Image (cartoon, helix red, strand yellow):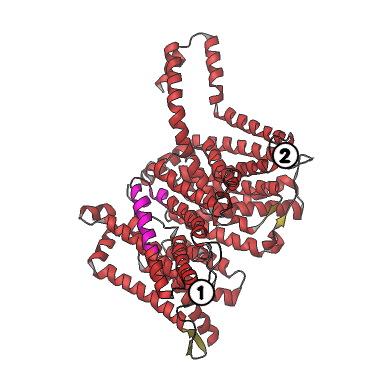
Amino acid sequence: MDEVLQPFLRSLETGSVYALAALGIIVVWRTSLVMHFAQGSMGMFAGTAVAFAVNRFGQPLWVSVLVGVAVAVLMGFLVDFAVIRRLRRATAVGKEIITLGLIMVFLGLAPIVFGTEPMLMPKAIPSGDIGLGTASISYNSVLNIGLSVAIAVALFVVLQKTKIGLAVRATASSEPTARLMGINTRRVTLLAWALAGVLGMLAAVMIAPATTVTPTFMNTVQVTALFACVLGGLQTFYGPVVGGYVIAVVGNFLKLYVSSVWGDQLLYLLILVFLVFRPNGLFGKTYMQKV
Amino acid sequence: MTELDTRAVDAPAPPRRAAATLRNMPRNPYLQYALFGAALCVLPLLASAGVLKASTLSTLAFVLIFSIAAMGLNLLLGYAGLISLGTAGFMGLGAYLAAYVQDDIGLGFWVALLAALVIPTFLGIIVGIVSLRVRSIYLAIASLFVSEILLKTFEQVEWFTGGTAGKQSAYPVIFGIQTTRGSMFVVCAVALALVMMLTHNVVHGQMGRALHAMRSSEVAAKAMGVNVLKYKLVAFSVATAYAGLAGALYLFFLKSSYPSTWGLFLSLNVIAMVVVGGLRSIFGTVAGAFVIFAVPELVLKKLPVIGDISGVPYIFSGVLIVLVIMFFPHGLKGLVDLVVGPIRRARSNKEVTGA
């Protein structure tokens, strides 16, 4: 029993991290039609700020996370306000290349701002397990899973039920039309970039206790979140979230039962093969292009 | 266009026409590339004469090698408007294949080069077929997929790559001659000149026109009878072939290869080279490779305070990408055109009025 349940529970936690990061990417994609490659790097930067507040200033984790939220929102605003917004006439490819450039900027900036010494991130709940039959799960994992599911659900509710959500969805379906209808699309994209930053930061804070905080600690999350978006399909907000969980669960079982060495490669190949048969992902609809 | 026509009509005397051809000679692109390659071949002589430091020569050799990979990406990014994040993976595959075929199987330089060209290209075509049917951005992610798979493979398949300890190789024997660092530099220069000529050919042929049409409107190009998928696929496979070639040359020049070289950061740097040098510019790509690779190596690392900070080359590349896209969409090439354009125009006007 615990041969199946235990790894399943563990992959739910990593899945939550992927889901949060993927959610950030899809929010930007839906509102700006730009693939946000720097999502992980920006999350890394804000996450390192959290670790910095904990390690150097001895702040409790929740204060540090608030600092991280402030840093992430500021970064998101700055990137949209100073760069993306000025590129009205640039193509989507140009904007995507900019996000690729931002990866390098944040990667280089982090050691300069926060020092080169690797830092450790404490868990929100340091110890304690819940027994589930023969398997067990730590309180911290339950918190992480619960938090990311709650954030995803809250986001969907906001998107479907509130006026801001309507504005975001309108912008997502057609930015020029939304603008003509009187929606302040600039504010929507600003919000999207800031939200992406916060989601990336949360993903970083959740994954960090399992590793050390270095400029590259979010690389796997960054790459996997992009894959989750493709797997889930870029047309819905919930697709990438589901994609994140699917990748974590399937990946974990492949590593455990098929090959610990080839698990990742096999998973990526499976997704590629899956895309041959369902090019638009799990929940994708066919996308029409017009002249 | 009209300037050219009047000149042709207004130049009746054969000697004057000959002089005009002579003056226009360096404008023949193929000759330009050949001259450029030949000029590069002088550098190893300067190095052996002690004028140029050996480490500088190595840095310049890597500039040439990365130029080749960037040339392929420029074709892809500049003409087809597609992003590939797999350049590093395909380069690494080329490097390890070259080492495996030359040193482990012992089939020599040419077979190794062929393997480094053919196998990555084949892989690239498969990736392209899978991803390009959906939408363009999928190619970026699919190539990232493959690059990740390759990177993990490089780390783990020790009989092929030597694992994280790295793969050692030796300078190849070409046409019965044992190469050295200097002659490998010449090989890289010749390869770059050939790649420049080939790229020029590709973009000025039917394919170039098709790619131009696709870039402004894919659907319109499709309606005009352009097989969009085919040309995207060809552009991507040319890019992977160049990446494989660059990887093989990298291995032959450095004589070793480590998995950590072939990560996402290298792919991003190659994109930076293309963007900074100027999209759709052949010489610009080489200039971009120089700025992105050689300037941090030769200048930034020598600066007093900045040189000690490890993240500076990253920030340098990243900020340049952002600034160039924001303010100089045509990169270094655009900057050169801004300066040279008026001069050239003034000169050709004078020629016309003079005749």
Label 2 chain ID: B
Q: Is residue A78 left or right of residue B347?
A: left
Give the main secondary structure, helix, strand or loop, of the magenta stretch. helix
Tell me residue A89's x, y (percent).
34, 45
How far apart marks 2 and 1 lie (CA) works out to 50 Å
Q: Inspect this view and state whether residue B30 appears.
A: yes
Query: Furthest-bottom residue in view?
Result: A133
Crowd rating for badge 1 (residues with CA inside 10 Å; few <14, some 14–19, many 20+): some
The residue under label 2 is B182
Of residues A29 and B336, the one nearer the viewer is B336
Please state the extent of the stretch shown in magenta in the rendering.
A71-95
What's under tag 2, amino acid-wise? Gly
Camera-near label (2 vs 1) is 1
Element type at marker 1? helix
Q: Do pointers 2 and 1 mark residues of a single chain?
A: no
Q: Are marks 2 and 1 in contact (CB under 8 Å)?
A: no
Q: Quadrant of residue B195?
A: top right
